[in-house]
Amino acid sequence: VGLPLTRGLRSFLPNLLPPPILDGLLILSCLPTTVNMCIILTSAAGGNVASALSNAVISNLLGIFATPALLLRFFGESIELPFGSMVLKLCNKVLLPVGKLAFSYV
């Protein structure tokens, strides 16, 4: 969906959105959906929540590999990232506050 949408906007309405916004739309279309959104929408529609949960988990696990491959395919560039530094920053921002909150109730 993202590729035809962004290409169509670039071709037919070139001045509607700036190129970085169109690139962002393409990147967002490559990402898998969140698990909670799948469950909420499925239960609201009266669908099979267990099936939606397993589908969301599988698609998120596949998204770990599919998202970088799709982005490389669409943008044709690769970048070098400081992996260790990123993981450390992520742990400090996400896991540390969650751990503090969890231990405050013990």
Image (tube, helix red, strand yellow):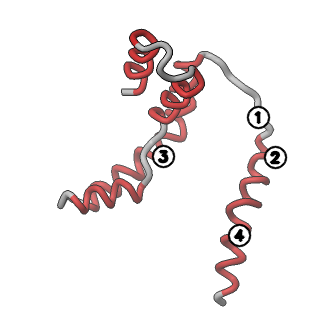
Q: Which of marks 4 and 3 is nearer the N terminus?
A: 3
The extreme bottom residue here reads: 106
Q: In terms of depth relative to the viewer, which is nearer, 98 or 28? A: 28
Tag 1 and tag 2, C-beta contact below 8 Å:
no
CB of mark 3 within 8 Å of CB of mark 1? no
Q: What residue type is labelled 1?
A: Leu
Which residue is labeled 2 in the image?
85
Q: Where is residue 14 in the image (x, y as percent from the top left)?
A: 48, 13
Work out which residue is located at the far left of the displayed protein and give it. Answer: 46
- For the point 39% across and 22% down, which residue is it? 5
Estimate the spatial distance between the alpha carbons at disc 2 and disc 3, rounded to whole Å: 23 Å
What amino acid type is highlighted by mark number 3? Answer: Leu
Q: Work out how far the residue at label 1 is from the one at label 2, CA to CA, in angstroms.
A: 9 Å
Secondary element under disc 2, as helix, strand or loop, is: helix
Amino acid residing under circle 2 = Ser
Secondary structure beneath dot 3 equals helix
